[in-house]
Image (tube, rainbow, N blue to C red):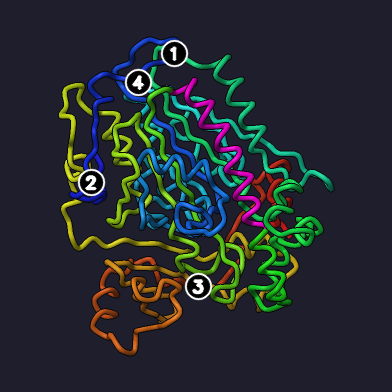
Amino acid sequence: MRRLAAWGTAAIFVGVMAFAIGCKGPDGKVLDKPHIVLIVLDTLRRDALSAYGYPAKVSPTFDEFAKKGLLFEDAISTAPWTLPSHASMFTGLLPSKNGCHDENFKLDSKQVTIAEQLSALGYQTVALYTNPWLNPYTGMDQGFRDYIWVVWPVGKDTTMKKGGEALLKRLVGWNVRRRDTSKPLFLFINLMETHPPFFPPEDYRRAVAGERGVKIKGEDSSLNRQMDHDFGVKKIPADEIKLQRLVYQGEVAYQDYILAKLLKTLERIAPKALIIITSDHGESFDEHGLVNHQFALYDELVRVPLAMQFDGCFANGTHVRTPVSLTDLNAMMLRVAKASSKCKKHIPMKELIPETRDPDRIRIAEYHRPLLIYRLSHRIDPKILSTMDRRLEAVMKGPLKLIADSRGAASLYDRSEDPGETRDLSPERPADIEFLRTKLGPWLPFSPFDPTTVKTDHISPEIQDQLKALGYVM
């Protein structure tokens, strides 16, 4: 069995009465294992939610969910984009360990996913997702009995409708036709309303940005424009980026509306479930000269929201300040599924996740060379593309964060004093740099740039259409 990741805090107590009484299936039968639901809100920034301090009340559903369970203050993703982040959640391993990242976007079948582990324990496993990067070719379907891609319409007027409400309908239909009520359920959901391009329904655009928001077009935040900005081909004006951030908040509000409907549906389909809500990564709005979610490991990309409920088994409104990683979700879900029917009412988190006892935990985020984007970015000169040809690794211990690249550059930040990561402390703290460098992975160096090493002929026309709508095929 894979070694459990360090996670949690000794100060947080969890009531696990649900383990003793079991959970119920939709038909009312008591099951001996709890339902488990993992909801990933794709590209959702932590600071875009009211629960984490966003001044406008754009996320009442998420906020109320967190008030009835656990809200994690410092959760990080292992990568700044969809595929490697999900692979880490599913395997509990860093991208460099599970092999699924920008340079190899298929999970090796030898890797064991949480869906496979839970299936072996008797769970019915199902996934419904809207992001085309999670298609079966990537190996993300390992262990799922049903793996349902909700394809959203592509066209001039419908490009930006990214499938959230359609997914809800598919979930209800699946429950009627495919649900085995004799088994506990493991359900994975991916929603991507907050993924660019940003074009929520008109009333949401008007609510957050007024008439300027109504006039904005989805293509204004397309990946084409974002890549031009990041590579210096043509910068997006600062006032327009501010407007796009507001429209993004409209997507946050719209997705929160969909989340409310999803949680209501789950009351029927998976009563008394452990429900985990998180994001795979964030989004940049020119904080460090970049937009979109590539080429960097700053907190706007890798610090993510995380909240959990478990049928009243968590103390309402508990804020977990202990640093955690999305790799920890695998171990926790498996431990919950294996929990004995005989348990104490209050178990410290350090017992639920034993390695939380480590006070000097190191957390890692990685960014491998974006070779696939290079291969798909037909419009941009390869010489310009090569300026971003580097690997990145972030090493975090407490408030300190080292970001190092494969070219030898490194910067150090104290996130407690400088949450925006604007002041590089490396000249002042060489000892910290030296120590954190010892935690860097051996994969960081690489050979010269060669975009022809990336194969894309396996990508089906249907998937290419979806990727084109998102701007990845240029």
Q: Nearer the viewer, residue 151 or 235?
A: 235
* Rendered view: 409 above or below 261: below
Q: Residue at x 31, y 22 (%)?
A: 33
Query: Crowding near pointer 1: few (<14 within 10 Å), some, many (20+)?
Result: some
Between the C-alphas of marks 4 and 1, the distance is: 12 Å
Q: Residue at x 38, y 31 (%)?
A: 116
Q: Which residues are magenta?
A: 247-270
Mark 3 or 4: the one toward you: 4
User: Residue 257 lies in magenta, yes or no?
Assistant: yes
Which mark, by number, is residue 12? 2
* Rendered view: 360 above or below 178: below
Q: Secondary structure at mark 3?
A: loop
Q: Earlier in the sequence, mark 1 or mark 3?
A: 1
* Rendered view: 188 above or below 445: above
Q: Earlier in the sequence, mark 1 or mark 2?
A: 2
Between the C-alphas of marks 1 and 2, the distance is: 33 Å
Which mark, by number, is residue 181? 1
Q: Secondary structure at mark 4?
A: loop
- Left or right placement of residue 64 versus residue 272 in this view: right
In what quadrant of the picture does the N terminus appear? top left
Amino acid residing under circle 3: Arg
Mark 4 or 2: the one toward you: 2
Q: Secondary structure at mark 1?
A: loop
In what quadrant of the picture does the C terminus appear? bottom right
Amino acid residing under circle 4: Gly
Which mark, by number, is residue 390? 3
Mark 2 in CB contact with mark 3 (< 8 angstroms): no
- Left or right placement of residue 131 versus residue 357 in this view: right
The residue at which mark 4 appears reads as: 122
Q: Secondary structure at mark 2?
A: loop
Q: Earlier in the sequence, mark 4 or mark 1?
A: 4
User: Residue 52 lies in magenta, yes or no?
Assistant: no
